[in-house]
Amino acid sequence: MNVASLLNTPRTDAPSTSALTLLRVEAGVIAQALLASARESARESVLAFRFMRGLLLDGGFSAPLK
């Protein structure tokens, strides 16, 4: 038997509950940022499509509607 194992308490590698809460909050923030960027990207794609359609159909510059 190892003498050090008798003197030292066994370590647990599991993170504490506060660390798990922090990880959960960080994951939520990252997920919200990803969804917001995807939504914004889709909006920009629609505006770009409308602008190009206006150029092709009207033959001139037409500002996209927001």
Image: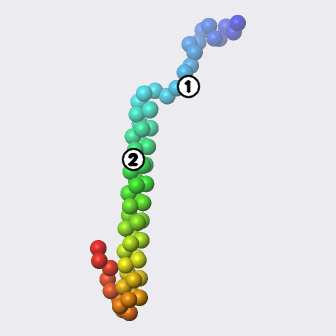
Q: In this view, which residue lies farthest toward the right? A: 1
The answer to whether 40 is drawn above or below residue 52 in the figure is above
Is residue 1 or residue 49 the one in the foreground?
A: 49
Residue 21 lies in what quarter of the image?
Answer: top left
Q: Position of residue 20 (x, y in %)?
A: 44, 32
Q: Position of residue 29 (x, y in %)?
A: 39, 47
**Quadrant assignment for the N terminus:** top right
Taking 9 as reference, is 22 left or right? Answer: left
Q: In this view, which residue lies farthest toward the bottom? A: 59
Residue at the spot 65% in from the left edge and 11% down from the top edge:
4
Residue at the spot 49% in from the left edge and 28% down from the top edge:
15
Which amino acid lies under the numbered mark 1 shown in the image of this protein? Asp
Number of numbered discs overlaid on the protein picture: 2
Residue position for label 1: 13
Residue 10 lies in what quarter of the image?
Answer: top right
The answer to whether 11 is drawn above or below residue 33 in the figure is above
Is residue 36 or residue 11 the one in the foreground?
A: 36
Q: How many residues crowd mark 1 within 10 Å: few (<14), some (14–19), many (20+)?
A: few
Residue 35 lies in what quarter of the image?
Answer: bottom left
Q: Position of residue 66 (x, y in %)?
A: 29, 73
Which amino acid lies under the numbered mark 2 shown in the image of this protein? Val
Query: For residue 62, which numbered disc appears in the image?
Result: none
Q: In this view, which residue lies farthest toward the left? A: 66
Q: Position of residue 22 (x, y in %)?
A: 41, 36
Element marked by disc 2? helix
Taking 8 as reference, is 33 left or right? Answer: left
Element marked by disc 1? loop
Residue position for label 2: 29
Estimate the spatial distance between the alpha carbons at disc 1 and disc 2, rounded to whole Å: 26 Å
Q: Earlier in the sequence, mark 1 or mark 2?
A: 1
Residue at the spot 38% in from the left edge and 57% down from the top edge:
36
